[in-house]
Amino acid sequence: MFSFVMFITSGAAIIFIIYRRFKLTKKDIELQNKVLIEDQKIEKQKNEPLLIYKTLFNTAKEKYKFSNIQSKINNHVKIAELLKKVKYAEDRGQDEEAIQLLMQIISIDDLHLEANKKLGFLYLKKGEDSKSEFIYRKTLKSKNDPITWSNLGLCLFNQGKLEEAAEAYENSIKLDKSRAARFISLGHVYHELKKYDKALENFEYVHKLEPKNVDYMFVIADYYERKHNFAKASAMYEKILKHQPYNEEAREKIHYLSEKNNT
């Protein structure tokens, strides 16, 4: 009987201890949860200024993007309007007015290709070759264009910068070999530099592009005479007579060279 009572008592004690531990564990968990919630609140409070800053930054960024896009649109519209005015001024022969308008465009967009090309040409037309050179060199930094190189060659030639002019025309020809005028210009530059063989090469290329152009046949024949290549010179004059049978100058040259060969 005593043993049974002791068993019951021990069992009750164990159950009480387990229950108490369970309650303590539950309290610990609740306390830990409270601490965790408090920690999360503190962390959130810490991060709130950063979140606010990020939100404000992103909002400002979007506003800047929109403002920048709007500014570009406004500039595009303004440039289009100015280009219309430039065309109107050019059609009326008002070059000074066109120059002022083009400078307004360049003040908005310094590398605007069309405006820079037009301005460079107008300066070239006016004989302001140093200004034209500056504009064309700037333009070539943004676009490697054969026409711009050719125009640069002309304004350099006008300033007596012959070596630079030759280089500019060579660059133009590298990009486009279809225009006889560029070979003619380069031929003239090499003639001024007294590089007659190079000059002749370019005029011969002109003859390939324009085989019926009698003027340049005369130029080529003259170079052959300078080189004492009378056979080639005579052949070129004969070719001229095929195109212009009554060309007295060509006939006289053939007669002259024939006598020269016989002496």
Image (cartoon, rainbow, N blue to C red):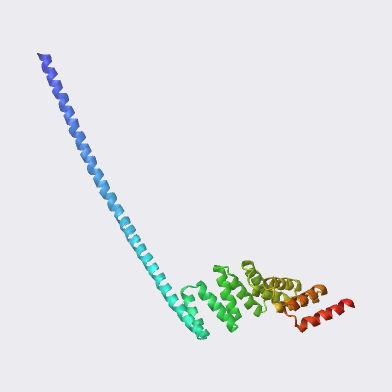
Task: Locate the N terminus by quadrant.
Answer: top left
Front-most of residues 112 and 131: 112
How many labels were placed on the picture?
A: 0
Name the spot of residue 138 as percent of width and height, x first: 56, 72
Q: Residue furthest right?
A: 263
Residue 228 visible (yes or no) = no
Specify whether 151 is left or right of 18. Answer: right
- Residue at the image point whose x is 58% and y is 75% from the top: 134
Residue 174 visible (yes or no) = yes
Q: Residue furthest left?
A: 1
Name the spot of residue 43 as percent of width and height, x first: 29, 49
Task: Locate the C terminus by quadrant.
Answer: bottom right
Q: Would you identify the image quadrant in which residue 67 lies?
A: bottom left
Q: Residue furthest top?
A: 1
Q: Would you identify the image quadrant in which residue 141 lies?
A: bottom right
Specify whether 116 is left or right of 217. Answer: left
Instruction: Tell me if residue 133 comes above or below residue 50 in the rendering.
Output: below
Front-most of residues 151 and 138: 151
- Residue at the image point whose x is 54% and y is 68% from the top: 142
Q: Would you identify the image quadrant in which residue 197 lies?
A: bottom right
Name the spot of residue 36 as percent of width and height, x first: 26, 43
- Residue at the image point whose x is 69% and y is 70% from the top: 208
Front-most of residues 26 and 245: 245
- Residue at the image point whose x is 56% and y is 78% from the top: 120
Instruction: Tell me if residue 27 comes above or below residue 168 in the rendering.
Output: above
Specify whether 210 is left or right of 118. Answer: right
Instruction: Tell me if residue 134 comes above or below residue 11 in the rendering.
Output: below
